[in-house]
Image: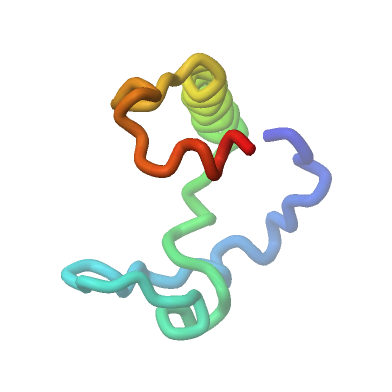
Amino acid sequence: HLFPRLVQMDRLEAADDPDRTAGTVFSHPVSQTSLNGVTGEPSRACAEDGEKLFRQMVTKLTHLVENAAIEEPPLPIENWNDVSIILE
């Protein structure tokens, strides 16, 4: 939804390539799971769905970064091993 001018509508249906990862245990690179570098059906995509997904990702990433900024270690400093090495 951010750059609609980059979408090549005439190529969407040819880009569809099924997801071959169902039932796999390991993550595999795209070159081992797709014939054309795509997984799924981009022909079903629309700007409205893209905007919704983008907003969800931004919201979740924002929360993750905010939580990371205030996160404390699970154990207090007096329980850390060899903390003197780190603090020197």
What's the coloring here? rainbow
Is 72 in front, or is 47?
A: 72
Left or right relative to 36: residue 75? left
Compared with residue 38, is residue 85 higher up or lower down, i.e. above or below? above
Report the quarter where the C terminus lies: top right
Q: Position of residue 77 (x, y in %)?
A: 39, 24
Is 15 in front, or is 22?
A: 22
Name the residue located 47 percent from the left edge and 76 percent from the top edge.
29
Visible residue check, residue 82: yes
Name the residue located 56 percent from the left edge and 69 percent from the top edge.
15
Left or right relative to 77: residue 43? right
Left or right relative to 57: residue 19? left
Report the quarter where the N terminus lies: top right
Visible residue check, residue 48: no
Is 20 in front, or is 13?
A: 20
Across the whole image, how many numbered discs are drawn on residues?
Answer: 0
Left or right relative to 11: residue 21? left
Compared with residue 31, is residue 52 higher up or lower down, i.e. above or below? above
Compared with residue 2, is residue 67 higher up or lower down, i.e. above or below? above
Name which quarter of the figure residue 71 lies in: top left
Compared with residue 80, is residue 28 higher up or lower down, i.e. above or below? below
Residue most toward the left? 23
Name the residue located 52 percent from the left edge and 55 percent from the top edge.
43
Q: Position of residue 2 (x, y in %)?
A: 74, 34
Name the residue located 78 percent from the left edge and 40 percent from the top edge.
3
